[in-house]
Amino acid sequence: MITLGIILIVLSLFANIGTLQSLGILLIVVGIILALLGSAGKSVGGRRHYW
C-alpha cells in the first residue's frame, strides 16, 4: 500500500494531476498506520500482522 502510494505520487508529478497526489498521500498514511498497528501486535482486519 505504501509502495502504491509512492507510485501514485510520482505519476501525479509527471502527469500534473492533483487527485492522484491526494490518493497517493492517503495510501501512504493508511499503509503506515496499518504497518505500525501490525508491528505492535494488534490484529488488523483479523490478521496478526500486516505485510
Image (tube, grey):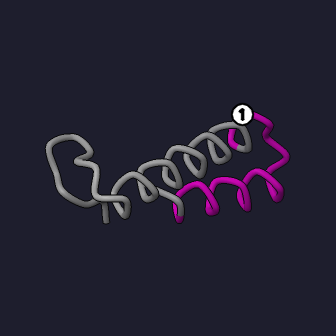
Work out whether residue 51 or residue 6 is closer to the camera in this orientation and state it. Answer: 51
Badge 1: how crowded within 10 Å, few (<14), some, or many (20+)?
A: few
Residue visible at 46% across and 57% down in the picture:
36
In the displayed structure, would residue 48 be above or below residue 46? below
Residue visible at 59% across and 54% down in the picture:
5
Q: Magenta stretch containing residue 11, yes or no?
A: yes
Direction from residue 15 to residue 30 in the image, left or right: left
Q: Tell me where the magenta segment starts and ends, as one range.
A: 3-20
Count the labels in the image.
1
- Which residue in the rendered view is the most extreme toward the left? 46
Whole-percent x, y for residue 41 in the image: 28, 58
Direction from residue 42 to residue 48 in the image, left or right: left
Residue underneath mark 1:
19
Figure quadrant of the C terminus: bottom left
In the displayed structure, would residue 7 be above or below residue 46? below
Quadrant location of residue 8? bottom right
Q: Magenta stretch containing residue 14, yes or no?
A: yes
